[in-house]
Image (cartoon, grey):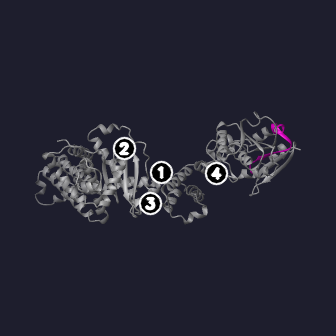
Amino acid sequence: MRKFVSKIGGQAVLEGVMMRGEKSVATAVRTSDGRIEVETERIPQEEKWWKKVPILRGFLSFFYMMIVGSKVLTRSAELYGEDMGEPSKFELWLAEKSNKSVMDIAIVIGVFLGVLFAIGLFVALPVGVVTLFEYIPGFKGVHYVWRNLVVSGVRLMILLGYLVVVSLVPDIKRVFMYHGAEHKVITCFEQGEELTVENARKMTRLHDRCGTSFLVITVFVSVLASAFLPAFDHVGNKMVSFLLRFSTRLALLPVVAGVSYEVLKGLAKFDNAFVRILKKPGLWFQLLTTREPDDSMLEVSLTSFKAVMEMDADETIPVRKFNIRKDYRLVRREALSYLKENEEAETLVDWISAFYLKVERSEIPALELIDEDAATAIKEAAKKVGEGEPLQYVLGETSFYGVTIKTDARALIPRGDTEFLVEEALKRDLSEGKRVLDICTGSGAIALVLALKTEAEVTASDISEEALSLAKENAEALGASVTFVKSDLFEAIEGSFDLITANPPYIPSAEIEKLDANVRKEPTLALDGGEDGLDYYRKIRSAAFEHLNAGGALIMEIGFDQGGAVSALFESIGKVTVTKDLENHDRVVTVEKE
């Protein structure tokens, strides 16, 4: 008789249950303070060709579920408050080289070690035990089929002993109780009963599609698969004989896992006397891996099951995340690992942390636990900066003269050096009726500050459409009134102004490749000032005074050693003043039209 089988399967985790449907996964965990937290995610629906290939789909699904299970176990442990420990240097190194998070690396390592442990316990150890039996007089003369059966018997005894031992661990006992709760809820649904604690309590804690049954089926399938494998008696060296036996059985594992998966699925679909006999061994072993749950555990399992049902039925329901708190010290350590080649690593992580945590840098030493989203953002930002991305581009903004300016690769990053230009500009009379022109505006930083802090009419220009689009976005965000014009310096500029400001490209062409890697990520158009770095100052000199009113001023940012050269260009047409920065470097040249 064919029976109804739910498309939802589950797994017990630390203080909770994970349920997996056709389109989603939900994990419900009871926290240490008694609340039930739920985390959900969508399952990608792309069609995998191997899912249609019998045996292969079972083997690959087995490893996929190991990875998913390890991830869910880790998440539940973090939510419940279990200390996951500091990441090792090896994990940090792997995370850096593979461009994956430390948590992802830890999960992969955990799965790898789990597979090695299983191979050692259920493949190498049984073969080794039987190899030792050969020292018993007369055993070597036993037919190799019977000796292979002995190997399988030893494997079954090891599995039984392993389950008995781990069931004595208090935390594992509770996991086994949640395992029972998972089975009861799924059975309640398959029986057509209303999903309530009362109805679930009445159900059996054993289930046909349990992973324990899969393990038992795997043992029996391996008996059949390996029964006729050669014993390699002709090999004189016992170590070589052991390695050959171990290798052949290891090579058989993918087939065994794949066949066991198909058998488990097939048996779960039917219910008759013959099928029930085949299911019995797996159900007997489930008596060890499940325990009767209490009502609070059933409530957690029901919450997880219902969340999956809702997610599968309605694709518009947003996913939920656990509200996990992370140890800031561990987050900082991982972030620093991405910046170990940077001399300013500590300072950079401070800035990144302050930005995402919305705190002052002075508060950072006192941080202990932080939100998971902020922790992820800090680590990802540090990784990008470590790969050469400018910090301001990664954060998406920077502070300039007390104003927040949006920053990205469309324009040069506004820096503190340019604030000296703004200081000089604000010393001028920029009352109502005065006109200001900012050329090479880039992100619009200079023009926006002058528009916000004075009553003057401000126009800004740039040759780059991308830079102008960024400047317009900044103006809109700040509510600043600025007229933007696409122009190659003064080419499309009409009328005259009382003040003209400019932060033109002034890096000599040969110096561009010598700049820091993060600076080279900025637009070359905004950096390259020609062979000697003065090309744009010459162009400005030839046209600026035609657009400058009498008594007006031209204020330009310059390179730290360009004061003399730029002054020489303009001294014949106006009064020139060079302003130095806090490090006593030339920084701003002001030319006044008399």
Name the quadrant of the N terminus. top left
Structural distance between the alpha carbons of marks 2 and 4: 42 Å
Q: Which comes before the other along the chain, label 4 or label 1?
A: 1
Q: Which residue is mark 2?
A: 312
Q: Are marks 2 and 1 in contact (CB under 8 Å)?
A: no
Q: Is residue 49 visible?
A: yes
Structural distance between the alpha carbons of marks 4 and 1: 29 Å
Q: Which comes before the other along the chain, label 2 or label 4?
A: 2
Q: Nearer the viewer, mark 4 or mark 1?
A: 4
Element assignment for label 4: strand
Quarter of the figure with residue 197? bottom left
Residue 458, above or below 29: above
Structural distance between the alpha carbons of marks 1 and 3: 14 Å
Residue nearer the viewer, 435 or 553 = 435
Q: Which residue is mark 3?
A: 88
Q: Which comes before the other along the chain, label 2 or label 1?
A: 1
Q: Give the residue type that dot 4 points to.
A: Thr
Q: Is residue 128 visible?
A: no
Relative to residue 108, is residue 52 drawn left or right?
Answer: left
Element assignment for label 3: loop
In reply to whether residue 157 is colored magenta, the answer given is: no
The part of the chain drawn in magenta is 543-560
Q: Which residue is mark 4?
A: 398
Structural distance between the alpha carbons of marks 2 and 1: 37 Å
Structural distance between the alpha carbons of marks 2 and 3: 39 Å
Q: Which residue is mark 1?
A: 97
- Mark 4 crowdedness (10 Å alpha carbons): few <14, some 14-19, many ≥20: some
Q: Are marks 4 and 1 in contact (CB under 8 Å)?
A: no
Task: Find residue 512 and report its horizontal and vertical position in percent.
Answer: 66, 44
Q: Nearer the viewer, mark 2 or mark 4?
A: 2
**Could you say which disc has been placed on residue 65 in the image?**
none
